[in-house]
Structure formats: C-alpha cells, structure tokens
C-alpha cells in the first residue's frame, strides 16, 4: 500500500514505512489452506453526538484471499433494520463477489466482479433486475452504512481506484493516498495510526489503521458519519 523506498527521506517517512510493513504483513500473509480470522470486532457508528448504528464484523483469510462479513443494526437499540453483507476479495486485494440482504423488506443485492465486467443483481418485493458495467482495473467495494469493507484496501500504492457501492448502484473514481495519522485514542486506547485517504472532489473518506494493520476508525466528513472500534462490546 505504501512504497517505503520513496518515503525513507524523512523521519515521518521511515515511520510510515514501518507501519506499511506491519499492515501488509497483517493483511497479506502467505495463503493458508484453512480459513483464519484476521480481525473481528464491533464499530459504533455515529453522526454528531448520536449513535445511529452498531456493526459487528469479521475478516477471514482464506486460501483464495479474504472474506469480510458484516451485520449492521439500525438503531443499535430497539433495532428496526438489520443489513447483513459478505464481501469476497482475491489475493490481489481486488473484490470478486458481494452479497447483501436487508432482513426487513427482503431487499437483496448480489455483485460479481470479473476481469472485463461487473454484474449487479437485485431482488426486492417489486421483482428482480440485473445490470452490467465495464470492469475497472482497480476496484474497492465500500458502503456508507457498513464500514468493515474498508478493512482490506487495494494493495498497491497511491493512485486511482474505483469505489463501488453495490447496494446503491454507484461507481466513482477516487484518489487513494496515505499519511501518518499520529496518535489516536479510540474507546480509551491510545495507538499510533496510518491513514488511508480516499478523495473525489469534496467527497473524502479517511480510514485509520493501527500499527498491527487493523482498521480502527472510518470517517466521512461530508456526512458527519464516524465509525469507531469499541473494545468491550457495549454501544453507549
């Protein structure tokens, strides 16, 4: 994700290089024959001072790449909407398949990513539909309501990446850059961080990773939404 040789000219560059090595080692170790849990936990999703959702997630490493599962509850207490999603990522860090379903209403989305085309299929009470789009050289599946998918960013260094929102049928090119995030306190724990920044005009997403390469925070400034790790499982 970061090219250490280009950054070693400064103390900050050397620190970022060390963080990059840890992040790549955590996310892209040698393939194993059996699935292995890379990370799992809970995000508290807030807008302003209000907690609006709770996301439980798990990141698995498989022989074919990665599998991220996410269950989002809106609101976290007295839940009215639950969205469950699964994202499959290849060893090259690019998406291969996505599936998401809303328990209330039966809305379901399935996406298949191929070398030449992207296929979306949706099912709802109103029927089924399918759409095809040309594939992008470098894609990144995201969501504005589920944040675990940011846990495995495209492996290569900074540059253009096409963000894809399968549930919203949206695709936009963003620029990916990285920076030193300094020390961050998340749910009472202090840690050094590296930030992956995705930007397209005024639309920006910032993803904080700790030195172990684990996603601890996602912020979308334009909407005021922040997702942060909580360690004891309680959404306050």
Image (cartoon, rainbow, N blue to C red):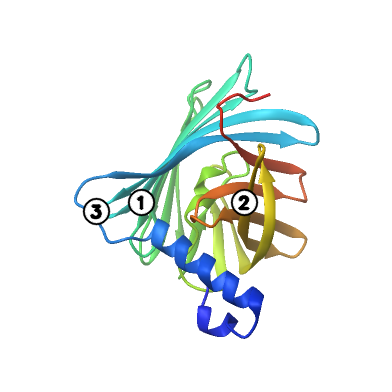
**Residue 4 location, x and y as percent?**
52, 78
Asked if marks 2 and 1 touch (Cβ < 8 Å), the reply is no
**Residue 130 location, x and y as percent?**
43, 45
Q: Nearer the viewer, residue 59 or 230?
A: 230
Q: Nearer the viewer, residue 138 or 36?
A: 36
Which residue shows up at 50% across the image and 48% down it?
Answer: 149
3D distance between C-alphas at marks 2 and 3: 31 Å
Mark 3, residue position: 63
Viewer can see residue 67: yes
**Residue 164 location, x and y as percent?**
54, 54
Q: Nearer the viewer, residue 180 or 67?
A: 180
Q: Is residue 111 above or below residue 85?
A: below
Q: Is residue 20 above or below residue 119?
A: below
Asked if marks 2 and 3 touch (Cβ < 8 Å), the reply is no
Single out the mark in the foreground, 2 or 3.
Answer: 2
Mark 1, residue position: 66
Secondary structure beneath label 2: strand
Mark 2, residue position: 191
Graded by Cα atoms within 10 Å as few (under 14), some (14 to 19) or many (20 or more), the crowding at tag 2 reads: some
Single out the mark in the foreground, 2 or 1.
Answer: 2
Where the C terminus falls, by quadrant? top right
Which residue shows up at 40% across the image and 62% down it?
Answer: 25
Secondary structure beneath label 1: strand
Secondary structure beneath label 3: loop
3D distance between C-alphas at marks 2 and 1: 25 Å
Extreme residue toward the left, this view: 33
Q: Nearer the viewer, residue 15 or 161?
A: 15
């Amino acid at each position: 994700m970061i090219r250490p040789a280009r950054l070693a000219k400064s103390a900050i560059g050397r620190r970022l290089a060390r963080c990059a090595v840890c992040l790549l080692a955590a996310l892209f170790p040698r393939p194993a024959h059996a699935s292995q849990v890379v990370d799992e936990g809970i995000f508290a999703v807030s807008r302003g001072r209000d907690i609006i959702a709770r996301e439980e997630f798990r990141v698995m490493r498989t022989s074919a790449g990665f599998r991220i599962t996410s269950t989002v509850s809106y609101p976290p207490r007295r839940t009215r909407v639950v969205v469950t999603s699964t994202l499959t990522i290849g060893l090259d860090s690019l998406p291969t398949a996505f599936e998401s379903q809303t328990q209330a209403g039966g809305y379901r989305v399935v996406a298949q990513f191929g070398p030449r085309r992207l296929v979306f299929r949706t099912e709802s009470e109103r029927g089924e539909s399918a759409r095809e789009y040309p594939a992008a050289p470098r894609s990144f599946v995201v969501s504005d309501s589920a944040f675990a998918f940011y846990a495995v960013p495209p492996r290569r260094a900074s540059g253009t990446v096409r963000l894809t929102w399968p549930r919203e049928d949206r695709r936009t090119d963003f620029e990916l850059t990285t920076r030193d995030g300094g020390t961050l306190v998340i749910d009472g724990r202090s840690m050094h961080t590296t930030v992956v920044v995705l930007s397209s005009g005024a639309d920006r997403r910032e993803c904080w990773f700790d030195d172990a390469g684990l996603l601890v925070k996602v912020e979308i400034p334009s909407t005021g939404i922040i997702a942060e790790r909580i360690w004891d499982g309680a959404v306050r």
